[in-house]
Image (cartoon, grey):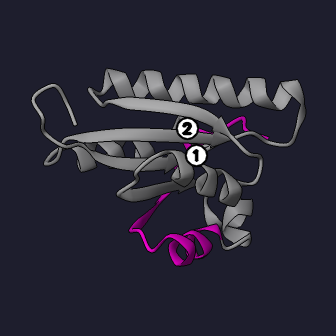
Amino acid sequence: IDEEGLPFKVTLVVANRTTRSDELIDSLKSKAENERHLFVVVVPQEGGGGHAAHQARGRLSQLRERARHAGLLVAGMVGDPDPYTAVMNALEFFRIDDIVISTLPETRSGWLRANLIERVKKATNLPVEHVVAGAEATAGSA
């Protein structure tokens, strides 16, 4: 609820290597056009150790900056290396209305190979939107 007492719709956004994608920002902007939104971003770190957490923090920072530049209200955190666990953890801390999962294209996405979208839909009973990032957003990603 904002300072005027109006409720926000809260969307959980899960992204990692796709945090720079125009498709993701466009999807979030579209959601915020007709409703007051708070976007809670979770960036799962890739593996353990300080280097993985540092990379995830950098991706989170880039996405938050781009989202704020687009006029969106965002908060975020680095999540568990397993994206499913990262989603479940976020749901313990936030009242979430819907979920956006941003992935690489099908041929490059480990999250899709692990059936993340369907697993999250089944476990949460929340609306889940899948955003596929374009090639230019992931250029240079390992």
The quarter of the picture where residue 24 lies is: top left
Point out residue 92 in the picture as x, y percentages from the top left corner.
55, 52
Does the CB distance between marks 1 and 2 fall below 8 Å? yes
Q: How crowded is the residue under tag 1: few (<14 C-alpha within 10 Å), some, or many (20+)?
A: many
Point out residue 69 in the picture as x, y percentages from the top left corner.
33, 21
Of residue 26 and residue 43, the one placed in the foreground of this image is 43
Q: How crowded is the residue under tag 2: few (<14 C-alpha within 10 Å), some, or many (20+)?
A: many
Q: Quadrant of the N terminus?
A: top left
Of residue 7 and residue 103, the one placed in the foreground of this image is 7
Point out residue 7 in the picture as x, y percentages from the top left corner.
19, 43
**Chain part drawn in magenta:** 116-142
Q: Does the magenta stretch include residue 56?
A: no
Q: In which quarter of the image is the C terminus?
A: top right
- Which residue is pictured at 69% across the width and 62% down the height? 111
Helix, strand or loop status at disc 1:
loop
* 133 lies above or below 1: below
- Which residue is pictured at 38% across the width and 49% down the height? 11
* 70 lies above or below 37: above
Give amino acid for label 2.
Thr
- Total numbered circles: 2
- Which mark, residue 19? 2
Residue placed furthest toward the right: 49
Q: Is residue 16 left or right of residue 101?
A: right
- Which residue is pictured at 35% across the width and 57% down the height? 97
Separation (CA) of disc 1 from disc 2: 6 Å
Helix, strand or loop status at disc 2:
loop
Point out residue 131 in the picture as x, y percentages from the top left corner.
47, 57
**Residue 5 visible at all:** yes
Q: Name the residue under label 1.
A: 15
